[in-house]
Image (spheres, rainbow, N blue to C red):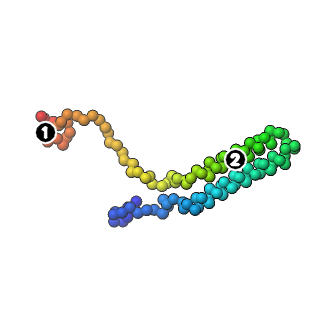
């Protein structure tokens, strides 16, 4: 984005990344919610062990064992990138390629193609 005079680029506030404190707080909340689900899985396993088929209890145990790994992966995923942010590099189109011709093949050659 350019300023009115066209001198310096102007930063848009909407392109600013999320503050680090908010990002960390959001990831902590997500981690704690997943650990809460894990705790519920353990409690349900203990409470329902003799009242439901064994496979249901085993599924709850497996979920309780796998959830910490998944929660840590998501918590350490880092800051999210925004898709609507401007790219860091200037994307330029590469013109048509080709092999260079003989001297004088270009229209701006003063010899006009004659040697």
**Which residue is identified by label 2?**
67
Q: SS for tag 2?
A: helix
Compared with 52, 21 (above or below) is: below
Compared with 10, 99 (above or below) is: above
* Relative side of 101 to 44, left or right: left
Q: Nearer the viewer, residue 31 or 18?
A: 31
Compared with 86, 45 (above or below) is: above
User: Residue 105 at x, y = what percent?
Assistant: 20, 36
Q: In which quarter of the image is residue 50?
A: top right
At x 68% / y 48%, what residue is drawn?
68
Mark seen at residue 111 = 1
User: Residue 24 at x, y = what percent?
Assistant: 60, 58
Circle nearer the viewer, 2 or 1:
2
Q: SS for tag 1?
A: loop
At x 84% / y 39%, what residue is drawn?
53
Binning the other alpha carbons within 10 Å of mark 2 as few (below 14), some (14 to 19) or many (20 upward) gives some
User: Residue 3 at x, y = what percent?
Assistant: 37, 64
Name which of mark 2 and mark 1 comes first in the sequence.
2
């Amino acid at each position: 984005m350019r300023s009115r005079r066209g001198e310096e680029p102007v930063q848009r506030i909407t392109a600013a990344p999320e503050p680090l404190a908010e990002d960390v707080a959001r990831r902590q909340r997500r981690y704690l919610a997943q650990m809460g689900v894990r705790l519920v899985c353990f409690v349900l396993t203990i409470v329902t062990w003799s009242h439901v088929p064994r496979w249901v209890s085993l599924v709850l145990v497996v979920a309780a064992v796998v959830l910490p790994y998944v929660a840590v992966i998501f918590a350490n995923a880092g800051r999210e990138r925004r898709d609507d942010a401007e790219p860091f590099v200037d994307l330029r189109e590469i013109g048509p390629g080709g092999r260079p011709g003989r001297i004088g093949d270009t229209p701006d050659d003063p010899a006009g193609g004659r040697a």
